[in-house]
Image (spheres, rainbow, N blue to C red):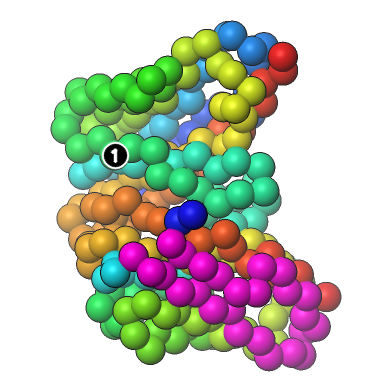
């Protein structure tokens, strides 16, 4: 079945450093979504990518969808302590199928 | 606030108990979901309801029984659970019936502990 792999599982950075998490699917995706879950909280939607090679930015966050629509990345520039949490990617295979979530990357930031 | 509420927020139950989790969405969405979140595991989709009909059931044990009486409410009935069922149970909703195409709004979750 479809699998979504996410690396790294954990990442610790100093405040101000950059951070990247990668998401890879075993199959071509129709779309990919990214969520953030703060410690003790619940997942909150960040963005959805649909087009091959798509790049979207939200302030310090940059999201990319691979040309083959099988991988994606989230890059945070100059991390802040407010970026702490677990970042999940979630991909959808064929139309009508449910999202498959990756295991997430947990980011910690020290000041 | 996400517009999705869940009760109770915490639940401790014995293996012989029967309990229910409740989820309510105030967003006018058509689809609702139950997820299980365990430590070191990805979010596991349990059930999907679209327009009050179950459209997906990911081989969940029968000790978990969902109910969707209307498009705003979703229940998860629990009975004779096992300790390995201890987890955070998240409810979510989305606008469209095709679950993966729309962003999902999650509730705060119910932290379940089975003794």
Check the residue under mark 1 and report the chain it is in: A
How many numbered discs sit on the rendered protein? Answer: 1
B43 and A45: which is toward the camera = A45
**Residue drawn at (60%, 35%) of the image:** A85
Highlighted magenta segment, given as a residue range:
B3-27
B10 in magenta: yes
**Residue drawn at (22%, 63%) of the image:** B96
**Quarter where residue A59 is shown:** top left
Point out the residue furthest to the right here: B115
What is the chief secondary structure element of the magenta stretch? strand
Give the quadrant of the C terminus of chain B.
Answer: bottom right
Depicted B72 relative to depicted A33: above or below = below
**Quarter where residue B92 is shown:** bottom left
**Residue drawn at (59%, 63%) of the image:** B109
Percent position of residue A76, x then y: 47, 18
Question: For mark 1, does the 10 Å Cα neighbourhood hold few (<14), some (14 to 19), or many (20 or more) residues?
Answer: many
Q: In the rendered view, does A56 fall on the left or right side of B85?
A: left
B54 and A62: which is toward the camera = A62
Percent position of residue A102, x then y: 47, 43
Percent position of residue B49, x then y: 34, 75
**Quarter where residue A1 is shown:** bottom left
Residue B73 visible in rendering: yes
Disc 1: which residue: A48
**Residue drawn at (32%, 61%) of the image:** B94
Depicted B27 relative to depicted B21: above or below = above
Q: In the rendered view, does B38 fall on the left or right side of B12?
A: left
Residue A25 visible in rendering: no
Q: Secondary structure at mark 1?
A: strand
């Amino acid at each position: 079945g479809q699998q979504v792999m996410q690396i790294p599982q954990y990442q610790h950075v100093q405040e101000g450093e950059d951070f990247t998490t990668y998401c890879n699917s075993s199959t071509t995706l129709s779309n990919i979504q990214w969520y953030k879950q703060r410690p003790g909280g619940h997942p909150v939607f960040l963005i959805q990518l649909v087009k091959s090679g798509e790049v979207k930015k939200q302030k310090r966050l940059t999201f990319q969808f691979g040309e083959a629509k099988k991988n994606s990345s989230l890059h945070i520039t100059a991390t802040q302590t407010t970026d702490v949490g677990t970042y999940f990617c979630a991909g959808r295979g064929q139309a009508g199928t449910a999202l498959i979530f990756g295991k997430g990357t947990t980011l910690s930031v020290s000041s | 606030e996400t517009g999705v509420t869940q009760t109770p927020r915490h639940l401790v139950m014995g293996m012989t108990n029967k309990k229910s989790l409740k989820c309510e969405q105030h967003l006018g969405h058509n689809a609702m979901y139950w997820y299980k979140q365990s430590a070191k595991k990805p979010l596991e989709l349990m059930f999907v309801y679209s327009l009050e009909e179950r459209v997906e059931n990911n081989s969940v044990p029968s000790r978990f029984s969902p109910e969707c009486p209307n498009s705003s409410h979703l229940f998860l009935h629990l009975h004779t659970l096992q300790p390995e069922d201890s987890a955070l149970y998240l409810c979510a909703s989305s606008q469209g019936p095709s679950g993966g195409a729309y962003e999902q709004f999650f509730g705060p979750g119910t932290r379940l502990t089975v003794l």
